[in-house]
Image (cartoon, helix red, strand yellow):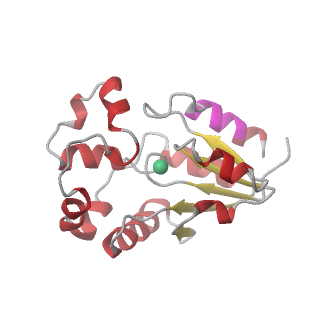
Amino acid sequence: MSKPSVICIDLDGVLVDMHWGLVRLFGDDPDKYTETQWAEVGEWGLSIPKGDFWGKVRSQGIQWWLNLPKLPWTDELWAAAQATGATCVVLTTPAPFPESSYGKWQWVNENLHTQNILIGRPKEICAQPGTWLIDDRAGYGPRWEGRGGRLLSLKRPWNKDGLSIGEILKILKEAC
Ligand SMILES: [Mg+2]
């Protein structure tokens, strides 16, 4: 397996527990959620009855983004990616308002101690041979790999066919 020169890592659902924050914001207790309920939340919490979804998120300001927790593997995943020697960058699509971009940038600075963050879309314009993407959305596969990159799809309740975090950490270790 060839070594990556660049590793792009998605933020929401991979490094930051945005889904936890969304469930809480929309009135449920995320700490009582079952695997089945998480699967229903899905990418961006779109199955939560939400009304003005983005309006409600935006009303929380930048601080809402800054207060989102890490996932249990965040530090280990970021360190493992860096240990490969590849250039590591957070690659994230913002919500459609500036507080999101501001908060994401600040979160990455404070929690990962890096300014290697690209905020925008479409993600696949960053794909090329030697560039890996770690993401919880399997749908990026054809677009990313069609440009010669490699997708490591992270298994989450809403992405059951993905690789477990343990499998991804093993692949990164083997790429060192
Ligand atoms: Mg994601």
Residue at the image point whose x is 57% and y is 69% from the top: 116
Chief secondary structure of the magenta span? helix
Quick check: 115 left or right of 34? right
Residue 42, x across and y down, in percent = 38, 39
Quick check: 13 left or right of 50? right
Q: Is residue 170 magenta?
A: yes
Q: Is residue 23 magenta?
A: no
Q: Which residues are magenta?
A: 165-171
Residue at the image point whose x is 39% and y is 49% from the top: 70
Quick check: 1 left or right of 121? right
Residue at the far left in the pictured view: 27
Q: Quadrant of residue 164?
A: top right
Q: Quadrant of residue 34?
A: top left
- The image shows a total of numbered marks equal to 0
Residue 9, x across and y down, in percent = 58, 54
When the figure is inspected, residue 42 is found, relative to residue 98, above or below; the finding is: above
Instruction: State the residue in front, 129 or 69.
Output: 129
